[in-house]
Structure formats: C-alpha cells, structure tokens
Amino acid sequence: MHFKHPEILYFLFLLVIPILVHLFQLRRFKKTYFTNVKLLKELQQQTHKTSTIKKWLLLATRLLLFAFLIFAFAQPFFEAKESEQKQNELVILLDNSFSMQAKGENGELLKKAVQDILENVDENQIFSIVTPSVAFWDVDKHAIQSDLQKLSYTYLPFEIDNLVNQVTLSKPNVPVDYIVITDGVQVKPSSLLNEVKSNVYFWLPKSEKQYNCSIENMSIVNESDNLYDIKIDLKSYGEFEDKVQLSIFEDNQVIAKTQVEFAKNKAEILVSVPKKEMQGTVVIDDKSLTFDNTYYFTLAKPDKSNVLVVSSESNATFLNKIYTNKEFNLELSTLKTLDFSKIENQDCIVLNELTNLPQSLLNTLQVFYQNGGNIVVVPNRDSNLEDYNALLQKFGNGKIVSSFNTEKEITKINFKHPLYENVFEKSVSNFQYPKVNSGFQFSGNFFNVLTFSDGQPFLASLSNKVGNLFLFSSALNKENSNFQNSPLIVPTFYKMAFSKLNATSSTFEIGQNSNLILNTSLAKDEVVTVKNKNYSFIPIQQIITNKVKLTFQDYPEVAGNYNIIQQDKEISKISFNYPKNESNCVQNNTLNFDNFTPIKSVSEALDEMYSKRLDTVLWKWFLATTLLFLIIELLIQKFVK
C-alpha cells in the first residue's frame, strides 16, 4: 500500500493524547465506606468493573477512529499493474484507404471509426492520429473534429510499418500506446509493432458486402479511318452474380452503353468510338466500392511518327512496306550521309546492319534515348564487336558473349511485352517458326521479347520509361533469315516506331511515377500546369531540346481528366486513374493480428488501458471506517453502563 501524502502520517503521534487522558481517568483512589452505605459495597465493586471495561472500549474505539481518519487524509492506494505506463502517449493508426469505403452495419467503415473516436476519447485527452495520407500530432478531439469528419479516402496503401516509422521519427524515445483501425484489406503483417513494449489494440471492422468489381484497363485494339475499337477490361471479386450497367461518357454525354456479365471473375467489353481527340469516362455501378467504378481516359489522334533508317547499304527496302506515308514520315540514310542534327527530331532510329558504330553516333543516340526516343538495332553478320559492345555498355551494361553460325528457330513470344499488347487475341504456341542462320549471343539487363528454342534472345528490349532500345541478335536480310516473311515482322517494327510522344492514349495510373514527353518548347523559368476544374499541380519538368519531359511522381492526388496548360493555353490532354490494389475487399489479411489485443471499438481499448493503469484508491474506505467507529462509540456510550 502507498500513500499520496505520507507526511500526514506524522499526526499518528497525536494518538498519545487520548491514551494519557484515559490513564488519568483510571487513576485509583482509596475509598472509605460509611456505615450507612456499607451494604452497597458489593454493588459498587461490580459497577466499577463495568465502568473500567467501558472506558477501555471507548479508548480503543477513539484510537481507531483517529487513526483511520489520519490514514484517510494521507490518501492510501494500491499501485496499478501498469502504473509505469501512465504517461504513455496515445497514437491511433487509422486506415483511410479506398477499401474503407465499404459499408458495415452502421455505415461506411471509415466514417464509423471517426465517429467512434470523437465520441469516446476523453475531452482533455491529448493524442495523435496517423493515416496513410495525413497525420495529426498532439491534438484533442475538439481541435481535430472538423478535419477528421472531412478526412478523404486515399489510394495510398495502409502500411503499418511505414506509419510506425513516422511515429518513431516524430516521437523518439517516447512510450506510445497504439490503437490500429483497419479493415485488413491488402495490409501486410507488421514487424515493428511486435517490438512495441506498450499496449497495441487492433480493431478490424468488416464490410457487409463481400463483393466488388472494378474497371481494370482500357486499350485500343483496332482502328479504322473513322473509328477506334476499344477494349474495356473488368474484374470482379467475391460472389458477383448480377449484371452491371456500363456507360461511356464524353463531356457528360452518353456515347455508348451496355451490360456486363462476368465469367470466371473477368469480363471484356468491345466498344467502337469515333476516331478523334476525346476525353471521357467509363462508369459502372456495382453497389459496392465506388472509387474503382470510374475510369478516366484520353484518346488522341496520333501524329505521324518520324522514322530514320540508317543503313550501310540499300538493304532496308522491307521497311518501306511497313512505314507507309499514311502514318509515318520515313527517311532513309547511310552512315556516311547521316545528318546528326536530324536525330533529335525523330521518334525512332533504326540502325540496320551497320558494320561500325562511331563513338559520336553512340553519344548522340544515348541523348536521344534519354529524351524519349526509340532505337532499333539490327546487327550485321560482320559487325565490329568492339563498337557493338560499346553500345551495350552504354545502354544495358551488356556484352556480346559469342557468335553462332548454326540455324536457330524463333519459338517463343513474350505476349506480355508492351510491343505485342493487343496484337494477339490469345497466346499462340504453335505457329510457323521464323529462323536465322547466324547471329550473336549477348548478355545484359534486357527483357526478352522473342526467344530462340535454346532460350537465347532473338529480340530483347530495354526501357527508361520514356525511351526504348530494341536489340536484334541477328541480321534480318533474306540470306540470313526468313523473318521478313514472318507475320511477326509487321506488328514488331510497327509498334517499335511509336514513342510515347505518339501515344494514342494519354492515360496513367496515379503513384506510378509516370513520364510524358510534350512536343513543345519552354522559355526560361516557364512551366506548364496540369489542371482541371477542381485540382491543379505543377509536375517536375525537364527541357530536352525542343521538347519537355514531365514527371508526375505521386501526383495528382485525385483521379480525373486534366488539361496541360502553357501560358493559359491548352497544349495537351491527360487522364489519371487510381490504382486498383484496394478493389479486392474480400482479401482481408489478418495475419499476425492475433499477437495483439482485439477490440470492437475505441472505447473498449481506452477502458481497458485506464483500468490497468488506474490506482486503487482507499481513502474512501478509511473514511467510511472512521464513521463506523464513531457510530460504535455512540453505541458504547448509550448502551454500555
């Protein structure tokens, strides 16, 4: 037992006073009995004995009364089990990712959690709330009420360890109690919370509807003179049996409408739209999560792509049939007649079977690649290996390992590579294999696009997100290969020629640190702005000759259709969509949550913490006992004679 005011216990010495008074009253006197009262002697002796017992009882009662009264003023208490954690700060890790839009028994999960916090946290409690998108440090509920009620959803994932790191940086060496509120969707197990020495409480609210569907992607699969054929990919999660209404809008006007029925949790919708510059939205209504029910897109009629083919001889005539005047501005040149100043204005450079690659050309191509251009390299059978190794070192840190002079078949296509996206209706495993008679084997950090039967690459690629390098391992002339007669040659070279500057769709996913190259020039200190009616931001900008490279990093924060503005003039359009990581509301990851205390409300956690840390106060019991002894004294005075 402990005392809040132990100095008051010194007053226990005052208990000597009633003892002295009692002893004085018990002092013996010699008594003389007169004749007329002698008969009362026995009665007097009996009464004297009773009076002595009464005085001893009164003394004991008064001593206990005063002792308990002094103890009451000293405020005794039993120390709580977790008394050392009384000064711990309270931090609430609140999940405001898109999956918290789901509705539970009492409404949206996030709004219910916010309401619970505001209703149950004590008026004077100072606490902190950390979410994936924003943090509120050392506030009370009145100061934070408005901000919490307006808290918006975010595409950012709820990563517990990242949030705990924020707390550690903001409050170094400060003991903290955690209340974690999340639905568990896509939440990874935490290693840092296991190291927390104080209390950790987990509240895992659940949604009522365990199903959802989302618009995953939209792409152009075919085009004619007047129409684009677009494919819309959708995905469903959980037991989704109902048909979903899908609409395509342009400037709030419906241009197409259909119903979606899912087969094996997937659906593909083919729709034709006018071939023109267009910003629009694809909208579905699935009665579940709403953030993934809208897909924003921008379609642009592409400019002609500028293609420069550099050959040692006139052996590139097969490219004339692919790069037609309708879609390309094709220019043929030899290495001797090459005008280096024209390279920066090209979208694609094809180095077709050059024997030598001068260092000046390699340096120029490296800048061209960094500025978003595409480079296609087709080696010569008699290529200078030192020059080509210099090329590989500059772009892919690679090296020509060896050469071969045996026939090889091209047997494998990487259908997931962007070069063949939407080219094939399905994966083909049995086709007429092209073959080569000789070539080179190279190594480096390249991605295989077409592969020989022995696993070595025939065509490999490298990308820096704005430019691409495509490297063949063999010459393509008819003496060395029949690849020119293969159906693969047209889509391969066709899509190689289009850089991101010529992209038909300017649609990006937020958070992917995407890049866009604009065919415009900026004056000194001039910037372009990305904006719509409700939101605007200035992306990172890099001037590259007569173009501008935009880097978006984690911006914008809000999905939608945007305009790119230069000097109050629109120069391009662009669209951004949220990532779909939170769409699978069925996948509640509760792994490792069992190590912590489960709760169903904030009040439950606070009550448990306070009960463990609240000292057991005893002064009320001591005061009650004092009153009891006072009553006992009165009874002794009245009934004991």
Image (spheres, helix red, strand yellow):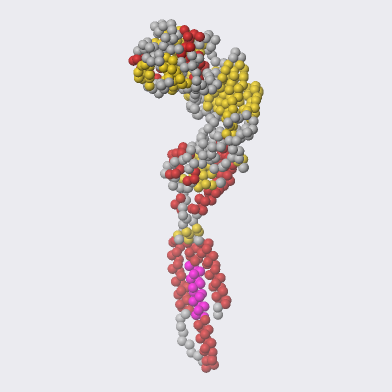
Q: Looking at the image, is 323 positioned above or below residue 464?
A: above
Q: Looking at the image, is 373 positioned above or below residue 61?
A: above
Q: Position of residue 6 (x, y in %)?
A: 44, 61
Q: Looking at the image, is 605 positioned above or below residue 280?
A: below
Q: Is residue 311 magenta?
A: no
Q: Looking at the image, can residue 126 be seen?
A: no
Quick one: quadrant of the C terminus? bottom right
- Which of the pair 595/627 is nearer the observer? 595
Q: Looking at the image, can residue 68 be seen?
A: yes
- Where on the picture, by quarter, is residue 459? top left
Q: Residue at x 48, y 87 (%)?
A: 31
Q: Residue at x 62, y 19 (%)?
A: 273
Q: Looking at the image, is 543 positioned above or below residue 23?
A: above
Q: Position of residue 255 (x, y in %)?
A: 65, 21
Quick one: quadrant of the N terminus? bottom left
- Where on the picture, by quarter, is residue 350? top left
Q: Main secondary structure of the magenta part?
A: helix
Q: Which residues are magenta?
A: 51-67
- Which of the pair 87/595 is nearer the observer? 595
Q: Position of residue 100 (x, y in %)?
A: 56, 37
Q: Is residue 54 magenta?
A: yes
Q: Residue at x 52, y 86 (%)?
A: 44
